[in-house]
Amino acid sequence: MADVIVGHDRDQHADPAAAEAADAERTLLITGIGELVTNDATLDATVPIGRSDAGGAVGVLWNAAVLIEGERIAWVGSVQRAPDGADAVVDAGGAAVIPGFVDSHTHLVFGGDRSAEFTARMSGHRYEAGGIRSTVAATRAAGEEVLRTRLHRLVDELRDQGTTTFEVKSGYGLDAATEAISVRLAREVTPEVTFLGAHVVPPEFEGRADEYVDLVCGEMLDACAPHARWIDAFCETGAFTVEQSRRVLEAGSMRGLMPRVHGNQLGAGGGVALAVELSAASVDHCTFLSDADVAALAGSETVATLLPGVEFSTKQPYPDARRLLDAGVTVALASDCNPGSSFTSSMPLMVALAVREMGMTTGEAVWAATAGGARALRRDDIGVIAPGRRADLVVLRGPSHAYLAYRPGVPLIERMWMGGVEHC
Ligand code: NIG
Ligand code: FE
């Protein structure tokens, strides 16, 4: 659908610094954009009166163009006013363009798989947090090179589905050495690295959870903190209590890591309240919420990150996104890609599930999977197509962002730019 219609060969520079400087100034105009979802609310006024098919998307421009300069967006507007003289021009051929997906919750470093557990669940077995231990055994046995190869394969997979920024957690090593390898590998592929030593209590600490928490807050944190930006804890029956989770999150904060929480996945509990108390960037899952949880989230800076791949794969009820949105809570969508509860890296699938099963409009779901993810990672350079932001954008194979829900399971990523560089 999209075609380069004008372009100059890249200047031949013998000097790499000069080549880099030329790349930093190089301009690309994407024109012929049928529907541009910017997520920039200041652009709402440009939606022509009478056009009602934006599905709640924020900052939609019709017949738009985007100018990219180096790794940033330089200009956004109507195609008629597009600046002349770009180094290259791409015609999107009437397709929709959205910000690249921001997947703020994944667990991509692991060995083995749990397809047998999935199969058993589909015939009636319940999901239990304890299944994590089988992945811990496989991860410890895998070795660094195998883990790296598998991680890179998953990164390729999520990029091919339109994800331009993603977070990666540790949490399948659960000893100091394997957790350190996990965060180091994660740091090779993303700056958004989360230390999740408090995922479950490993078998060698069975019945000694507090001693394990000592290890997480001590030697393990020492080994992992230099490679991580975030600290996380699974605050749930079968994993860690509120008190244990608080200890871990506070220890991480003391080392400069910012908190995020797994909570309220398998039942009502104190995860959300703890996340709000600690001003965590995000509390993830939020499947079982009390009215007090919803009110606390609404009055906070903490994003509620919903992970519908988990409910799809565990047959639990989906979280009630409508209830959260109507209360004024900031909602993000993420894949939670992991071998146990959600072995998918597809953000388009998350959008489709959120629209079909969770009461979100198509526009709300796209916002949550892009700008919402950016909020959950406390990033203001991504998730929005506006001048000055990173040039992370996706040309869809279709005229509307609604195709992401309307055509589930179909490859819809036509082209994608990450920091102004095309992903091929
Ligand atoms: O986010 N909830 C805790 N951790 C993962 C599940 C990991 C697993 O089952 O292996 C999650 O769903
Ligand atoms: Fe998770």
Image (spheres, grey):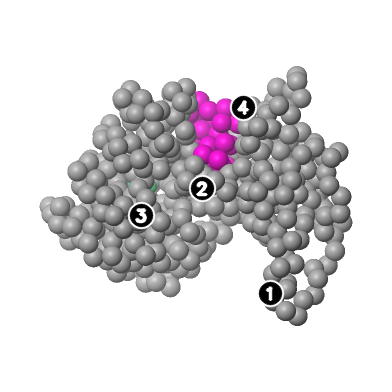
Could you tell me residue 365's position as x and y percent? 55, 34
Give the quarter of the image for residue 383: top right
Q: Quadrant of the C terminus?
A: bottom right
Q: Residue at x 39, y 33 (%)?
A: 300
Q: Which residue is mark 3?
A: 257
| Crowd band around label 1 with a 10 angstrom C-alpha radius: few (<14), some (14–19), many (20+) | few
Q: Which residue is mark 4?
A: 56
Q: Residue at x 16, y 52 (%)?
A: 209
Identify the magenta region.
347-372
State which tag comes first along the sequence, 4 or 3.
Answer: 4
Estimate the spatial distance between the alpha carbons at disc 2 and disc 3, rounded to whole Å: 15 Å
Q: Which residue is mark 2?
A: 379
Estimate the spatial distance between the alpha carbons at disc 4 and disc 1, rounded to whole Å: 45 Å
Estimate the spatial distance between the alpha carbons at disc 3 and disc 1, rounded to whole Å: 34 Å
Q: Which residue is mark 1?
A: 17
Q: Nearer the viewer, residue 88 or 288?
A: 88
State which tag comes first along the sequence, 4 or 1.
Answer: 1
Q: Residue at x 87, y 50 (%)?
A: 84
State which tag comes first along the sequence, 4 or 2.
Answer: 4
Residue 213 in view in this figure = yes
**Label for residue 176?**
none
User: Dot 2 lies on which element?
Assistant: loop
Estimate the spatial distance between the alpha carbons at disc 4 and disc 2, rounded to whole Å: 23 Å
State which tag comes first along the sequence, 2 or 1.
Answer: 1
Could you tell me residue 407's position as x and y percent? 64, 37
